[in-house]
Image (spheres, rainbow, N blue to C red):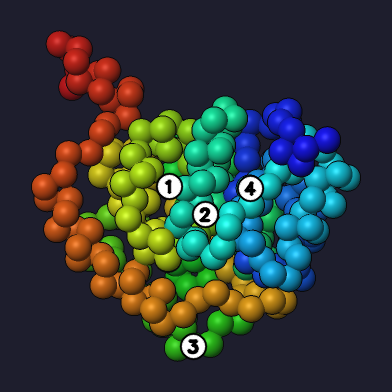
Amino acid sequence: MDSNDFSRHSDSIVIIPTYNEKENVSAIIDAVLGLQHDFDVLIVDDNSPDGTANIVKAKIAERPGRIYIVEREGKLGLGTAYIAGFKWAIAKGYDYVFEMDADFSHKPKDLVKLYSACAVDGADMAIGSRYVTGVNVVNWPMGRVLMSYYASKYVRFVTGMPIHDTTAGFVCYRREVLETLDLDAIRFKGYAFQIEMKFTTYKCGFRIKEVPIIFVNRELGTSKMSGGIFGEAVFGVIRLKVASWFKKYPKPRAKADNAERPDAE
């Protein structure tokens, strides 16, 4: 059977990009599939030389219909990995689409909180936030904590987004958000991708909710963060803001429909 034979089990898909995550990928899949709410898993692997994809295919054989993989030709960037995953999830009809790291820095059990924020509380985007209730980061060097925290403050100031953790990579989207955004127009490929997705969602008028989480630095494998990636996130924000002055953003269908009604507020 083809590893991508499709039979949707859940209304939710968790997209996990991987590059050299052999130490983590099997365990993170098991942790997600072991949650009380049923989440399917999509791994987007960038041709990991350590055999990550082969481990995933073995898991697919164990749990057919719950795990899927998209294999790409090389290391093409976090943003493009998620865009590929988003398009796959939309095509398969999932209602709730999640971003999550492979390294357990995001606790799998918090997926349920993000799901509830969208499915129960009515948010269009739910963000697993490190900074909405202070600084909830474990095992990061203090310099990196301060850099991340104040970068989010800077992004919030420049963009005007009422979001405390603008670079967070633990997110749930309702499908309508991803269908409304022009995914091919998202420019950034590194961690600035996270900012651009939130900013575009915000400018479209979708409802965004931050859900407090505790972020724990990876124990196994190698971090993909670099100064260049972080620099893109910081210095690309001004370009993003300026470009927004000349851009018209699509509105959610419900708001667009109400705007056409004579009695709409």
Quadrant of res 68: top right
**In the shown orientation, is residue 158 left or right of residue 4?**
left
Tell me, yes or no, whether the two marked residues, 2 and 1, touch with CB atoms within 8 Å.
Answer: no
Q: Is residue 135 left or right of residue 19?
A: left
* Residue topped by disc 3: 142
Q: What amino acid is labelled 4 in the image?
A: Val
Q: Tell whether label 3 touches label 1 (CB within 8 Å).
A: no
Question: Which of pointers 2 and 1 indicates the residue nearer the eye?
Answer: 2
**Camera-nearest label, 3 or 2:** 2
Which element is circle 2 on?
helix
Q: Is residue 63 left or right of residue 22?
A: right
Between 129 and 64, the one nearer to me in the picture: 64
Residue 81 — which label? 2
Residue occupying the point 76% across, 41% down: 3
**Who is closer to the viewer here, 185 or 115?**
185
Residue 14 against residue 161 in the figure, above or below: above
Residue picked out by circle 4: 70
- Looking at the image, tell me whether mark 4 or mark 1 is earlier in sequence order: 4
**Separation (CA) of disc 2 from disc 1:** 24 Å
Quadrant showing the C terminus: top left
Residue placed under numbered mark 1 in the picture: 209
